[in-house]
């Protein structure tokens, strides 16, 4: 008999005409979590950090949050503004931590640099890029994302799920239990084609400003986590993030891009230790 996974409590946050779904578990100080592209906040269901209450946000166009058709809603500036309002609603004037995975990690570090939130005392970036420094390469990436966006709208979510899970960056996930792989796939299939397409062209790596030269300006304790088998992002960990003595980094052995799913036990231990030993720099 198939075991049903326990459903976590949720809350809705209204930002203008959009509704954000937030998945909750744990008790204590707020830990806001931002998922990767085509995922949802439920990817963090196994995140367990004593002393922290997890607020795993379904980003705009994902999960059970609003999926507007207008492309403008997904533009970088609008997403960052909405994220700033969400953190204020959740944390108020209290200090909080933020964790972002992949796309969520890109947004988390941009949020920290653009908004300079005084309450953000700890930032955890998992398998995320600082962006693309060379303008020509960034433009080329935008064109690639735009082409993929058109294919998603033309061929649909089923095609996208097949295409996305076959990418080399997710090869290590083939060793996950079948139940876990199906949960990931179900979260991808729950998306809408226009929402994913607009996300790619609105907040993809082809449009985000390069953050790599400004990471030293972060005013919070920061940790970068990558999987040892994730060649691209482990290389970024060493060549970009380790340049700054204000940023701690760690590579989790024997896992790839999605470290919090591929080795949740080690991931939880690393995050717990980091948050327990940092007080924030304000």
Image: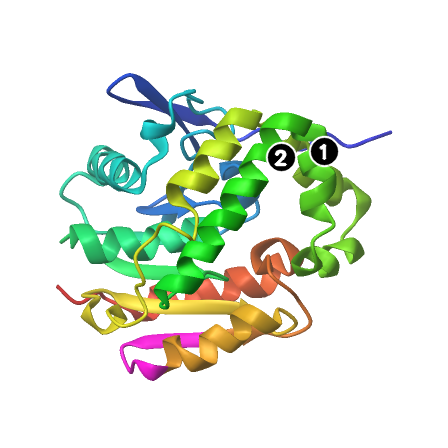
Depth check: give the residue in front, 244 or 267: 244
Please report whichever mark, 1 or 2, sits nearer to the chain's N-terminal start.
Answer: 2
For mark 2, does the 10 Å Cα neighbourhood hold few (<14), some (14 to 19), or many (20 or more) residues? some
Can residue 164 be seen here? The reply is yes
Q: Quadrant of residue 83?
A: top left
Dot in front, 1 or 2 = 2
Name the image quarter holding the N terminus: top right
Find disc 1 in the rendering and name its residue.
Answer: 159
* Magenta stretch encompasses residue 78: no
Return the residue found at the far right: 1
* Magenta stretch encompasses residue 248: yes
Depth check: give the residue in front, 183 or 68: 68
Can residue 24 be seen here? The reply is no
Residue drawn where x is 56% and y is 41% of the image: 147
Q: Residue 265: horizontal and vertical position, in percent?
A: 60, 61
Q: Quadrant of residue 125?
A: bottom left
Instruction: Classify residue 83 as left or right of residue 260.
Output: left
Q: Residue 3: horizontal and vertical position, in percent?
A: 77, 32
Depth check: give the residue in front, 225 or 131: 131
Q: Which element type, helix, strand or loop, lies under badge 2?
A: helix
Q: Which element type, helix, strand or loop, lies under badge 1?
A: helix
Please name the colour scheme applied to the rendered image. Answer: rainbow
Find disc 2 in the rendering and name its residue.
Answer: 151
Which segment did they paint magenta? 243-249
Residue drawn where x is 24% and y is 20% of the image: 16
Q: Residue 267: horizontal and vertical position, in percent?
A: 54, 62
**How far apart are the two marked residues, 1 and 2, measured between alpha carbons?**
9 Å
Q: Confirm or deny contact between disc 1 and disc 2 (CB under 8 A).
A: yes
Return the residue found at the far top: 17
Q: Residue 43: horizontal and vertical position, in percent?
A: 56, 43
């Amino acid at each position: 008999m198939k075991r049903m996974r326990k459903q976590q409590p949720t809350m809705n946050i209204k930002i203008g005409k959009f509704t954000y779904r937030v998945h909750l578990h744990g008790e204590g100080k707020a830990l806001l979590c931002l998922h990767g592209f085509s995922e949802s906040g439920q990817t963090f269901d196994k995140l367990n950090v004593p002393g922290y209450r997890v607020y795993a946000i379904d980003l705009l166009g994902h999960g059970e949050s609003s999926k507007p058709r207008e492309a403008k809603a997904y533009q970088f500036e609008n997403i960052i503004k909405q994220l700033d309002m969400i953190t204020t609603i959740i944390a108020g004037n209290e200090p909080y931590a933020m964790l972002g995975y992949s796309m969520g990690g890109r947004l988390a570090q941009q949020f920290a640099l653009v908004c300079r939130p005084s309450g953000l005392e700890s930032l955890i970036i998992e398998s995320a890029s600082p962006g693309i420094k060379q303008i020509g390469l960034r433009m080329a990436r935008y064109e690639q994302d735009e082409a993929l966006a058109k294919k998603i709208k033309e061929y649909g979510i089923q095609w996208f799920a097949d295409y996305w899970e076959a990418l080399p960056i997710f090869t290590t996930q083939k060793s996950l239990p079948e139940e876990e792989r199906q949960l990931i796939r179900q979260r991808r299939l729950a998306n809408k084609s226009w929402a994913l397409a607009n996300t790619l062209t609105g907040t993809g790596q082809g449009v985000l400003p390069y953050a790599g030269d400004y990471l030293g300006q972060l005013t919070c304790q920061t940790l970068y986590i990558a999987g040892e088998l994730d060649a691209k992002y482990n290389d970024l960990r060493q060549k970009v993030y380790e340049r700054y003595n204000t940023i701690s980094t760690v590579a989790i052995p024997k896992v790839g891009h999605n470290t919090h799913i591929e080795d949740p036990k080690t991931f939880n231990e690393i995050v717990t230790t980091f948050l327990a030993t940092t007080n924030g720099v304000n």
